[in-house]
Image (cartoon, rainbow, N blue to C red):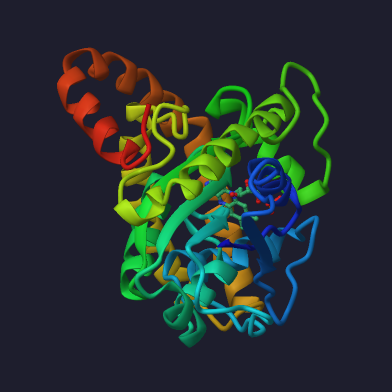
């Protein structure tokens, strides 16, 4: 009997839906699958009040974690771990970061093959770089990565995702598509569980090789990587400014957050569109560089 642990934190439920589909064809008489949820001691609100949403920004970026409950009924002898996480401010979400920094993670991840499963808007490559370090620190071996991203162009989800997170509304409106990942893509994630079921029966998880190649596990737009890197630089400055301005949920933070939110909106209306146009033009001259970035970030499960 092979044992698979599926560990995850999904605040509003989308990642959980992806996990359910991903694993729908995985368990059978020979494969046991244990689902365990990471739970923060103080649950996050949904929909998010405006200031609470931005208040999590510094702690996400600086990977400070939060208080979480110990995950119960977890064993140390899994053959494979699937770690489902969402991205918060281009970092793994705070509860998952907290878990990966815990003693418990050290006990269960040591020498285990790990598959990361991401469900987010569309900016996950820097979060995954952080996740690679977290997995390495607890002795796990990353063998695959699957990333599902929101429907519509990135510019649309810059509107539809915050609208959903701050109001709970996910319907299509004006010329915008619904918020979140396409239902058909979520359904199609069952192909990964199919492949894993066969691979586990052939002991392939022991080889250290990727098991989910050639299934379209990740789809990277090389031009977005530059945008992530630019945003990351500004994140480093603003996180420190917000943290310096007071404790979590304090009035001081609210003032800095208000300025930051105004800055972000201005950025979205000015620098981002200009950056997209420049990026499109420059990408014609930087094809080789962009291709090699895509190759790197698509590892280990690309194409
Ligand atoms: C505080 C916060 C910050 C987020 N930041 C990002 C981000 O930087 N990049 C991204 O692609 N998605 C981001 N998202 C979207 C999430 O990754 C995810 O798609 C969404 O929260 C729904 O997931 P869930 O229903 O499983 O909780 C953010 C969500 C939250 C709540």
For this rendering, which residue is in front, 189 or 285? 189
Give the residue at x 69% y 34%.
160
**47 relative position to 78: left or right:** right
- Residue 117 position, x and y percent, is 53, 49
- Residue 113 position, x and y percent, is 40, 60
**Is 276 placed above or below 300 here?**
above
**234 relative position to 1: left or right:** left
**Is 129 placed above or below 281 here?**
below
- Residue 258 position, x and y percent, is 61, 59
Q: Is residue 134 visible?
A: yes
Q: Is residue 233 visible?
A: no
Give the residue at x 80% y 59%.
46
**14 relative position to 68: left or right:** right
**Is 211 placed above or below 269 here?**
below
Quadrant, the N terminus = bottom right
Give the residue at x 36% y 51%.
143
Give the residue at x 72% y 23%.
177
- Residue 247 position, x and y percent, is 57, 83
């Amino acid at each position: 009997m092979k044992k698979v642990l599926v560990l995850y934190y999904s605040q509003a439920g989308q990642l959980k839906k992806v996990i359910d589909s991903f694993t729908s064809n995985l368990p059978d008489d020979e494969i046991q699958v244990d689902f365990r949820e990471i739970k923060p001691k103080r649950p996050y609100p949904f929909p998010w009040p405006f200031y609470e949403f931005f208040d999590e920004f510094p702690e996400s970026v600086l990977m400070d974690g939060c208080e979480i409950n110990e995950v119960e009924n977890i064993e140390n002898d899994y053959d494979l771990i699937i770690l489902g996480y969402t991205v918060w401010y281009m970092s793994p979400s705070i509860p998952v970061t907290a878990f990966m920094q815990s003693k418990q993670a050290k006990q269960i991840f040591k020498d285990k093959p790990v598959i990361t499963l991401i469900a987010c808007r569309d900016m996950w490559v820097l979060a995954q770089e952080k996740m690679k370090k977290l997995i390495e620190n607890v002795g796990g071996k990353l063998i695959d990565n699957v990333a599902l991203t929101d429907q519509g162009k990135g510019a649309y989800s810059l509107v539809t995702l915050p609208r959903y997170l701050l109001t709970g509304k996910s319907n299509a409106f004006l010329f915008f598509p619904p918020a979140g990942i396409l239902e058909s893509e979520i359904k199609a994630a069952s192909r990964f569980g199919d492949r894993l079921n066969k691979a586990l029966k052939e002991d392939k998880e022991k080889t250290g090789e990727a098991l989910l190649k050639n299934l379209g596990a990740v789809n990277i737009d090389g031009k977005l990587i530059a945008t992530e890197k630019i945003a990351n630089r500004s994140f480093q400055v603003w996180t420190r400014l917000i943290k310096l301005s007071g404790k979590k949920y304090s009035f001081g933070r609210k003032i800095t957050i208000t300025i930051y939110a105004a800055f972000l909106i201005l950025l979205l209306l000015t620098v981002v569109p200009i950056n997209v146009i420049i990026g499109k033009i420059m990408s014609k001259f930087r094809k080789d560089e962009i291709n090699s970035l895509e190759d790197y970030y698509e590892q280990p499960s690309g194409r």
